[in-house]
Image: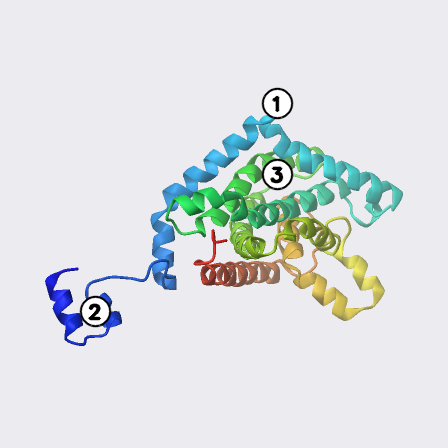
Amino acid sequence: MPETAVAESSAGVPLRELARRHGLHAAGARPSVPAYVRELWAYRHFIATYADAKVSSSLSKTRLGRLWQVFTPLTNAAVYFLIFGYILNTRDDVKNFPAYLCIGVFVFGFTQSTVQAGISSITGNLGLIRALQFPRASLPVSVTLVELQNMIPAMAVLGIIVLATGEPLTFQWLLIVPILILQSLFNAGLALFAARLGSKMIDLKQIMPFALRVWMYGSAVLYTVQMFERLDQKWLTVLLESNPAVVFIELMRHSMMEGVELASPAGHLWLLAAAWSVVIGVTGFLYFWRGEKEYGRG
């Protein structure tokens, strides 16, 4: 310690004040929110590079590589089309049920895969966390970037499917970009929530697939929102129409399909999408930030 610091401490100056004067901070102290945001921005290149590395490593472990990013939602859509479209005969409620169903499966799958990956973003990187000093939010954020990269080729295939089923290519398809941006912000907030919860609850990874499946069944992926209006349960219809998954799915259907009946007017859906993205993104970030000192311990 410098001689001036020794003199001041011997003169009765509190150690906290002494540390502040010399720019010292407690080891492992949680930074303020503005400082944490700046630190996270400073590591943006690390986040992008880490996400690219995760995508490359995951694809190198399979023979088909990127094709799995498309085969998985396509297989799910085929199974759901067989069960719900033919066996349960829900296809008669929609003019172009194959496109309607595929859009719902692909869009919900984007959020589903992000949440599932976010759960293990901390527990699966304990070696990195304990070896290096960096903002831990980098990990769930990079997970979101990984899933966004996976979503891009999937959207290309989805576009081919929609066109092949008779939908025209219109200027409204340009809305796909802002929809994906808003959904990515929403997904990032969920990934941050899931990352902190997953670091505390070991069994969350086993429970989450069931919770996500229930969410999917309640998100008009496999049927129209209007089906609930027949039940004459106003509260259930309002709850469904406010469901963030429904909001993003309906916006994507509105941009890629003509004449599709929406749960709410398009303007209202855009407001809901922006609100959900901001609320979940910000609260997820704050929730994760509050646990910054806990990650990697134990």
How far across and how far down the image is residue 236, in percent? Answer: 76, 66
Identify whether 193 is placed above or below 78: below
Query: Mark 3: which amino acid?
Result: Leu
Question: How far from the left and from the top, in percent, is residue 237?
Answer: 75, 65
Closer to viewer: mark 1 or mark 2: 2
Q: Quadrant of the N terminus?
A: bottom left
Question: Amino acid type of disc 1?
Answer: Arg
154 on left or right of 1 = right
Most foreground residue, 126 or 173: 126
Which of the numbered marks, if any, corresponds to residue 169? 3
Disc 1 and disc 2: Cα gap in Å? Answer: 60 Å
x, y percentage for residue 38? 34, 55
Task: Choose mark 3 or mark 1, whichever is in front.
Answer: 1
The residue type indicated by label 2 comes to Leu
> For the view shown, which residue lies furthest in the bottom direction?
12
Q: Are marks 1 and 2 in contact (CB under 8 Å)?
A: no
Measured in 3D between alpha carbons, the distance from the residue under mark 2 to the one under mark 3, in whole angstroms, is: 67 Å
* Residue closer to the observer: 130 or 183: 130
In the drawing, does residue 26 fall left or right of residue 295? left
**Residue closest to the eye, 2 or 191:** 2
Viewer-nearest residue: 205 or 251: 205
Decide which of tag 1 and tag 2 comes sooner along the chain.
2
Q: Position of residue 91 (x, y in %)?
A: 82, 45
Query: SS for tag 3?
Result: loop
Q: Looking at the image, do the residues carrying marks 3 and 1 touch, with CB atoms under 8 Å apart?
A: no
Badge 2 density bin: few <14, some 14–19, many ≥20, Cα 10 Å:
some
Name the residue tied to disc 2: 18
Q: Earlier in the sequence, mark 2 or mark 3?
A: 2
Quadrant of res 240: bottom right
Give the label on residue 63, or none. 1
